[in-house]
Amino acid sequence: MSAGLGAVFMHGNRFRHNLLTALLLAPATAWLVVFLVLPFIAIAVFSVGERAPEGGYQAAFTLAQYANLPARATAFWNTMMLAPVGALACLLVAYPVAYYLALKAPQRWRLILLALVVIPFWTSLLMRTYAWMYILGGRGIPALLAFVGIEDVRLINTPGAVLLGIVYGYLPLMILPIYVSLERLDRRLLEASADLGATPFSTFLGVTLKLSLPGVMTGFSLVMILLLGEYLIPTLLGGGKVFFIGNALVDLFLQSRNWPFGSAIAITLVAVSVVVLIAANRISTRVSGARRVDLI
Amino acid sequence: MSKSYRDGLPISPENFVDQLMRLKRGSIGRRDFLGLTGLGIATAVMAREIGIMPTPAFAAENLGDRMSIATWPNYHDPQTFENFKKDTGVAVEVNVFGSNEEMLAKLQAGASGWSLFVPTNYTISTYKKLGIIDPLDMAKLPNFDGSQEDPRFTGEGTIDGTTYAVPKNWGTTGFAVNTKKLAKPMTSWKEFWDVAMTEGDGRTMVHDYQLTTIGNALKYYGYSFNSLKQDELAKAEELLLKVKPHLFAVSSDYQPGMRAGDAWMTMCWTNDGAQLHRDIPEIAYVLGKEGGEIWTDFYAIPKDAPNKPAGYALLNYLMTPEVAVKEHLANGAPSTDARVNKLLPKEVLDNPILYPAADLLTPLEFGAAATLTDPGRAELMARFKSA
């Protein structure tokens, strides 16, 4: 076989290889274009339009919707408070669970315990949140407490109920990434740390926690992104008394049908989320000193 | 797969592994797949239950085998749709909605898939203006008898002499009170709001609906339920913001809270009031003496309805007094049709929740289309909810 023919053959091979890559990526690309890029463009166009007199969208080119954003300042503020606080509460509950699963649980139980973490996901969040409505409502836990003499306990429609619902709903999303990063932890590092005279606590801080930070940040960012759009749990367990961006969007699209204003808020929410995520990523890179966590 | 004595017997372990390996190799027939996964039975059941195979007698009328209706929660006797399917072979898919705006948004966005829906009086003119509902072909509704309808409730279904919607039932918006917890008798919206901030602190619910929540706050001062006047709305907003920290919830799903005893008082529609009182007698239904809302729900057919023949067939069926009477007994709302009222039991007609005294009805107002679509009221509601 001559060298020239070989080069052509190699070239053909590379061409085939590229074609295969393109074909393999095509479904995902098509999916993203149809369900992410096109809707995003539609929303961007809507956001510079006007509300039609009967509601909906009317073509225009104005920045009035963006100028009106302060009308939903409280909702933005509430969301910016809820998302990190909710994610932090989730983290505080999830970390010990993930730690136990990865480092302490007996090998033969591990898979079963992990399955138990995931199984609730098989039921819709709406159904599970509705169940909490009845557990926290007057005929649930308060009735049990009244039975043992503790009267007039109110749980449903309180901030505590919303936090409980959020931790319950998002816990698996926090546990799994932390579990994965702890599971990969090289046990010899822990021994080395102990050999070098570190106390268990400083070993945990200096080795375990530090090396699991990528998992923590992944879990934290995942939960926070979802919480930025959360509206179901505050509505059902908080009695709809606290207004988040998610609630503002539902009302604008389904109630007052002010689609342009809703679109402007949606675009702003996306922009804010991106900024928050980049900041979180920077912080995590600096703190862990490890490789960057590429989420976006 | 040939028919053999083994059909229907439990599969043996060897056979199972054989089948599994064959599936792994990718060789599978549709029937095998359906049989192995149990989906075959499911398909057969579904076909019967949701009418994939239409009853031959009606296939000639070309009603199709399925249609979809958009309506309100707890609003129909499920048996009605079962019977309709038995008669026509058309399975009815029921979509339940939380507000008129939500229905309007869905219909406006297009391709809702509904062949019949249940809008409230004040939305019909908007639907007509947007050109998304059909004028009704009355020839296809022989069971509807306009002369038997109370004109008070039918007006908004007809625009410029053309009928776009026929009434389903009417009702009022008052409030429900748990009289064991709040013993002091109440008769007005003024008392509703005052009690919400005192004895009913932390126990009162208002609708997550600007039309009624703002409307009934306006009634505190004796203003019109439909007011769009700046100064009057400002007063209503002031009241709402003052009451907000005392509320149990801002939600139109008030039955669970009232039933569990967490909420003692709530804004309430007739049919929910009747259901709550029926199950928990100490829950009373009050119409504010200052007035408030009276409403009629209608049936209408969307312009883009995918199965208009079935939509008309179901509507005509629902207009049969013998069918309608069962609907009213199930959902607890009063009827607009004199033929139906004749069939209702005396205790229903004497129930003051369903058929209030005339002097209480007089000050009530129908919600107006402008009230519903007013951007100012929408923003007021957003400020109230985010306060």
Image: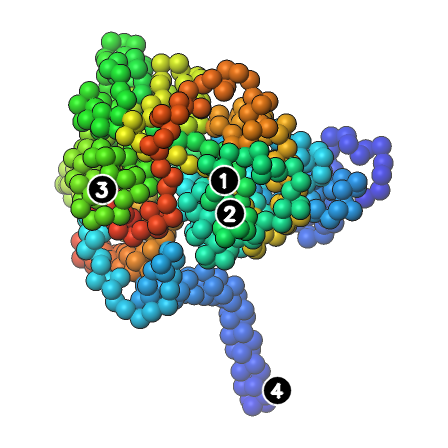
Q: Residue at 27% across / 9% down in the picture?
A: A148
A5 with respect to A32 (left or right) = right
Marks 4/2: CA–CA distance? 87 Å
| Quarter in which the C terminus of chain B is drawn | top left
Q: In which quarter of the image is the N terminus of chain B?
A: top right
Q: Position of residue A30 (x, y in %)?
A: 49, 65
Instruction: Determine if residue B266 is in view.
Output: no
Residue of label 1: B154
Measured as percent of width and height from the top left, residue B303 is found at 56, 55
Sequence-first disc among 3 and 2: 2
Q: Is residue A75 left or right of residue B10?
A: left
Circles 1, 3 touching at the beta carbon (< 8 Å): no
- Residue A54 rendering spot, x and y as whole percentages: 38, 56
Q: Do labels 2 and 1 share a chain?
A: yes
Note whether A57 is above or below A10 in the view shown.
Answer: above
Query: Alpha-carbon distance for marks 2 and 1?
Result: 8 Å
Q: Assign a secondary structure to mark 3.
A: helix
> For the residue marked with disc 2, what is the amino acid?
Thr
> Which residue in the protein does label 3 denote?
B384
**Label number found at residue A1:** 4
Foreground tag (1 vs 4): 1
Residue type beneath disc 1: Thr
**In 3D space, how far apart are the residues under numbered discs 1 and 3 (Cα atoms)?**
34 Å
